[in-house]
Image: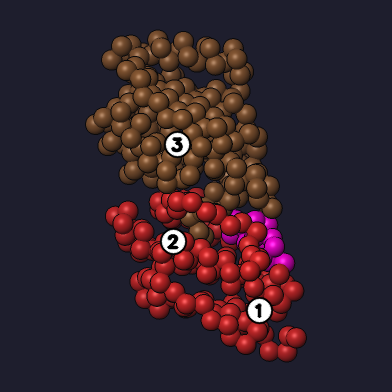
Amino acid sequence: MIPSDHFVRFYNEVFKYIVAKGPGEIRSYYERVSKNQEYHCLDLFKAKGLEGMHEYWEHIKVEENCDMANHLEPDCYWFEFFSCPSLSKVVDNDAGACPQYCNHCPGWILPIMTKTGHFAVYNLISRTEPRCMMFVYRDRTKAERKKAELVARYGADVILDNLGELAGKAGA
Amino acid sequence: MKSNLRYKSTGEVHKDFHGLTCATLHYLIDNYGMESVREILKNTAQKVYKTMHLALMSGDCSELTEWWKYYLDREGGVFSVEGQGDGVRLVVRDCPALRHLVKLGQMPDPVLCEATCIFNEALAEGSPFAVEFERTGDFSCVQAFRRREGDA
């Protein structure tokens, strides 16, 4: 048995293997991971929207021992990881980290946000530091404004979003 | 007592990862074949758990023994670990990973057992230990690292 506590180090080896298979391969795996994660949060996000996201990550905060802030505002759900336990374990690892490791979070989260009709902007900050942020809106204009702000501050390479995946409905 | 473990997690346990391990194993088999699972688990066993692998190569089961006890206990497994000559034997009566799959609405999928078997073989590669694995029920198994006859 691979202990739950060590799953992410196995996951990291999976990423190394799939990334080496060629461009585009990893996207299909993220879709499979996202499908798996739907069991845990899709209905909740559909039913409760931003409040459901806050509820989900409150649970994750405790169960995955996360040093994070989890915020619910009237028009935005956002979190900030001060020390992500997942990348922290992958860095503390005799096998070394996959350089694209951090991409898996937006990789599974953004498709779920698209399915629930939310606009999400994910800021990885850096792929070598265990920190990141995500902002989720019902309103496209607000998400676009946040994306522009984050790209200007952190650079486009670490900002991922689903704005291109959703029809441009603002103020839903 | 000094711990031999290279990675010793504390705090809460997020057992839902067993579901993702299972989904990942099936994804790998469906898209890249069983060889991909062998390669990834070999890297996990020999690079991630480098210290445990090197210890086994030198004939030392102590980190493996402690790893089994610590993590099966953390996950709420029903098990016993017995020294067996110069080797070690794990009897799992209720596997927490398979049990959690049921909690997630899935069947106790033997792909997890197959992965454990491949992982154990990779851990023991180049060591004086022969690996044994027997699935004894939907949630139970016996795993052993037995010193090969003639190996000092």
* Pick the front one: A39 or B118: A39
Q: Is residue A45 magenta?
A: no
Please report, as a chain letter, where disc 3 is located. Answer: A
* Pick the front one: A104 or B36: A104
Residue at the outermost bottom position: B150
Residue beneath the point at 42% across and 67% down = B77
Residue beneath the point at 63% across and 34% down = A129
State the hue of chain A. brown
Residue at the outermost left position: A47
Q: Does B131 sit above or below residue A108?
A: below
Q: Does B95 sit above or below residue A27?
A: below
Q: Does B41 sit above or below residue A109?
A: below
Q: CA distance from mark 3 to mark 2?
A: 26 Å
Hey, what amino acid is under mark 1?
Phe
> Which of the marked residues, 2 or 1, is nearer the chain's N terminus?
2
State the hue of chain B. red
Residue of label 3? A108
Residue at the outermost front position: B1
Q: Nearer the viewer, mark 2 or mark 1?
A: 2
Crowd band around label 1 with a 10 angstrom C-alpha radius: few (<14), some (14–19), many (20+): many
Residue of label 1? B129
Q: Nearer the viewer, mark 3 or mark 2?
A: 2
Please report, as a chain letter, where disc 1 is located. Answer: B
The percent position of residue B106, horizontal first and vertical second, equals 32, 57
| Element under disc 2 | loop
Hey, what amino acid is under mark 2?
Glu
Q: Main secondary structure of the magenta part?
A: helix
> Which stretch is magenta?
B40-54
Residue of label 2? B75
